[in-house]
Image: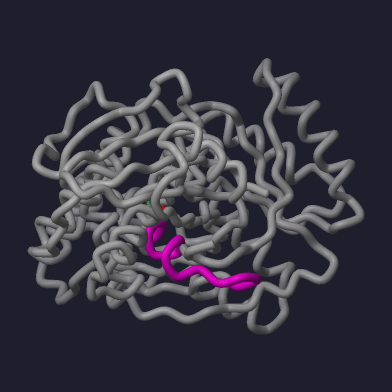
Amino acid sequence: MMKEIVETKFKEIFGTEGRFKTYFAPGRVNLIGEHTDYNGGHVFPCALTMGTYATVREREDKILNFYSMNFDDLGILTSSIDNLVYNENENWINYPKGVIWALKNEGYNIDHGFDIVYYGTIPNGAGLSSSASLEVLTGFILKDMFKLDMDNTKIALIGQMAENKYVGVNCGIMDQFVIANGKKDNAVFLDTATLEYKYAPINLENEKIVIINTNKKRGLGDSKYNVRRAECEKALEELQESGLQIKSLGDLTEKEFEEHKSAIKDEIRQKRAKHAVYENQRTLKAVQALENNDLELFGKLMVESHNSLRDDYEVTGIELDTAVEEALKQEGVIGARMTGAGFGGCAVSIVKTDKVENFIKNVEKGYREKIGYNPEFYVVEIGNGVRAI
Ligand code: GLA
């Protein structure tokens, strides 16, 4: 079991004395509602059973000793709760450091350090939220360690704050939220304008969720992510200046958008805003379709979502487009689309269980022929949110 593997490593690195505890936070896949979470729209993600594990022991001094089994060659990276400055060279520990920084920033009392070993089973840079998982895991551990008065939504907000203000990626709340609040066999239908949410059971009796990892790392994606966000903010401003009484693009229906879109003075920005509005409405329709047990319609909306992300939002690229195109050619596919920020990373598909084997074989072949290297596949289960294990 993973728990034993991480605890064994912990003892090897930091010794056997004292009390330690082990925790888990999942990764996530978003089924629909992409690039809507910073536009006051809805999202529909679920937590995965793959994720990040950590074993931790409190220290009496202010030292922070970080070790990741994913980066064994880096060894123990040491910091201190009194020195939480972002350091580009310090690599992955900026995420947990950012969470401690955000907690202190919010007035929580963090007065001693800890030794910690992390182990992640989510592929890095694949767009399945390995970094949000690390953030929420760390927030949850600190809540437990210092008996902090906060719920899981607050932990998610702390994680987002670390990402926005410390790491410098202006992400929305979706990833941290579902990692904190996810529930086995359910997707989380979240209104990002209010943070109200409800669980929606995903009863796939004869289908599986299959994730296709393009194996194209995101790289420059993060900076383009910030550009998209800025484009949407500018478009919103233009609509507001023209007299529209809205707080976010998520407030608009398709019809209202079409009536007012000429207020957005740039063609590209108009396309970006169009995606944000239509994708939000699509998410509402998709959740409704699922409630009506209309999986076919859900799949159709997934495909429309991908097309909009490709043509209007322009965050797909040849690898994601090829993965989805190949997926849609296969027998037994219900729907497929890119998931997460885009620019690389993963696509998500829903496939008839008895066709999954062929699906994987054929998509792999088609993808390799066009892109030149293999994708990877994960047939995933929907798991619970962050917890002690
Ligand atoms: C990334 C961000 C999320 C969200 C998605 C796109 O995963 O972290 O907040 O914006 O991209 O839907």
Viewer-proximal residue among 207 and 281: 207
Residue 14 position in % (x across, y down): 41, 36
Taking the spot 16% from the left edge, 44% from the top edge, the residue there is: 62
Residue 56 can be seen in this image: yes
Taking the spot 33% from the left edge, 49% from the top edge, the residue there is: 272
> Does the stretch in magenta take in 7?
no
The answer to whether residue 22 is above or below residue 298 is above
Viewer-proximal residue among 12 and 192: 12
Residue furthest toward the right? Answer: 354
Q: Is residue 389 left or right of residue 168?
A: right
Taking the spot 71% from the left edge, 50% from the top edge, the residue there is: 210
Quarter that holds the C terminus: bottom right
**From which residue to which does the magenta span run?**
174-186
Viewer-proximal residue among 256 and 320: 320
Taking the spot 36% from the left edge, 62% from the top edge, the residue there is: 140
> Does the stretch in magenta take in 177?
yes
The answer to whether residue 176 is above or below residue 125 is below
To which quarter of the image does residue 87 belong?
top left
Secondary structure, magenta segment, majority class: helix
Residue 163 position in % (x across, y down): 26, 47
